Amino acid sequence: MPKFAANLSMLFTEEDFLDRFEAAADAGFTGVEYLFPYDYSPAELKSRLDAHGLTQVLHNLPAGDWAAGERGIACHPDRVEEFRAGVDKAIEYATALGCEQVNCLAGIQPEGVSDEQARETLIDNLRFAADRLEAAGILLLAEPINTRDIPGFFLNRTEQALAIFDEVGSRNLKLQYDIYHMQIMEGDLAPTIERHLDRIAHVQLADNPGRHEPGTGEIHYPFLFAHLDRLGYRGWIGCEYKPKTTTREGLGWLDAVRG
């Protein structure tokens, strides 16, 4: 059976953020992920993890001004130094939290920046981050995201991401495969996962349309969970969805998987 991590940026939002750790543990989750840890001290977050027996599965590198609509800066040629400083900050947090992998959001392609400029900047930044994180014992991930929810997001398809990874040339860079985003952008989920399983280190889920919990849309999750088991996937699956009602009321899908 897959290992499921609660995404605390999207689940249990009925609670204050720091109270979501307890809520996730009470719901039977053993791992958590969230967008960013940087509004809290590492010690404060670690105490919540330890108190509730939770594993910190994932967080993102700093991604610019999120509140202002930025969604990453890794493809921004004029913000390389900011990106590199963010790598060091992510290492500080990930090390303190025992988090073995962090995700890089490529960002929205800036106006006036060509595809080639954005691509080369992203490659250089991924190479820098992969090397720096490898020295700290942390795996770097990068994630294609659909351009309907985030128009202009530069990294938006599986094959595009893997071609960029090939140019980066690091063993410390893997794919974060978000089922919801890739259903929108390309479909063909099961064959794509099977074809690239050795390059996928983390999976995330939500149903489509609506980005709600499994069972609310078109994606046949029981098949995909069984498929991942058959393939021998041993990583985590991050539950990064918007509950249709409340988090607890929408966890029937997870109870069914657990039997």
Image (tube, grey):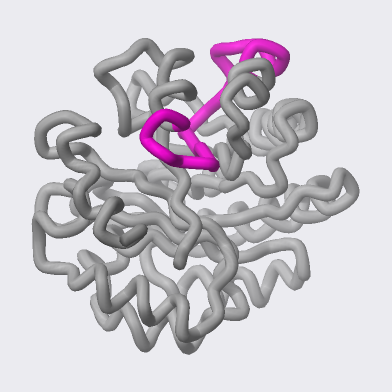
Q: Is residue 15 magenta?
A: no
Residue 145 in the image, given as x and y percentages of width and height? 36, 55
Q: Is residue 41 magenta?
A: yes
**Residue 65 shown left or right of residue 40 in the figure:** left
**Count of numbered circles on the image:** 0
Which residue sits at x=29%, y=52%?
254
**Residue 190 shown left or right of residue 4 in the figure:** left
Which residue sits at x=57%, y=47%?
103
Quadrant (top left, top right, bottom left, bottom right) of the N terminus: bottom left
Rendered image quadrant of residue 89:
top right
- Is 205 above or below relative to 243? below
Residue 160 in the image, given as x and y percentages of width and height? 46, 73
- Is 7 above or below relative to 218? above
Instruction: Read off the magenta span.
Output: 25-45
Quadrant (top left, top right, bottom left, bottom right) of the C terminus: bottom left
Residue 119 in the image, given as x and y percentages of width and height? 54, 61
Which residue sits at x=62%, y=39%?
55
- Is 54 above or below relative to 143? above
Residue 127 in the image, given as x and y percentages of width and height? 74, 57
**Residue 48 shown left or right of residue 212 in the figure:** right
